[in-house]
Image: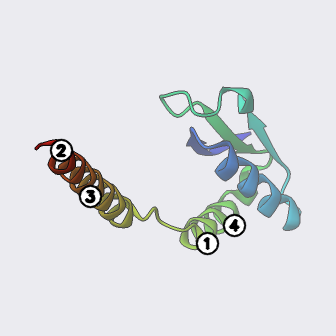
């Protein structure tokens, strides 16, 4: 057995296992019930060392298709929410002052 991935994402680990199984490469996911716990505790291992090169290529292909998080758009959303909340509070204060 040879480990090819260690992660905290159960989704990535299971996706890799399914992709490997589709290519007839037997793989084992261990510690899948520890998903999300740091440090990366879920591992994917292949049974045959001869499949290591193909397995790494499948992992690279899988990682390329994984969407990146849109952190910038989330920050913009928070900024807009804060501005709207500030405008609402300002409006309420102006309406209650004589």
Q: Residue at x 15, y 50 (%)?
A: 94
Q: Earlier in the sequence, mark 3 or mark 2?
A: 3
Q: Earlier in the sequence, mark 4 or mark 3?
A: 4
Tell me the CA gap for discs 4 and 1.
11 Å
Q: Secondary structure at mark 1?
A: helix
Q: Residue at x 33, y 56 (%)?
A: 81
Q: Residue at x 42, y 65 (%)?
A: 70
Residue tagged by mark 2?
A: 93
Residue tagged by mark 4?
A: 54
x then y, percent, for residue 91: 22, 54
Q: Secondary structure at mark 2?
A: helix
- Count residues near mark 4 (Cα–Cα under 10 Å), then give few for <14, some for 14-19, many for 20+: few
Tell me the CA gap for discs 4 and 2.
65 Å
Residue tagged by mark 3?
A: 79
Q: Which label belongs to residue 95?
A: none
Q: Quadrant of residue 47?
A: top right
Residue tagged by mark 1?
A: 61
């Amino acid at each position: 057995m040879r480990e090819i991935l260690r992660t905290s994402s159960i989704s990535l680990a299971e996706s890799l296992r399914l992709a490997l199984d589709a290519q007839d490469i037997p793989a084992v996911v261990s510690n899948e019930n520890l998903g999300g716990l740091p440090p990366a505790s879920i591992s994917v291992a292949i049974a045959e060392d001869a499949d290591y090169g193909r397995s790494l290529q499948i992992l690279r292909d899988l990682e390329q298709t994984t969407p990146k998080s849109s952190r910038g758009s989330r920050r913009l959303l928070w900024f807009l929410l804060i501005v709207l909340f500030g405008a609402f509070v300002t409006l309420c204060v102006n309406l209650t002052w004589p």
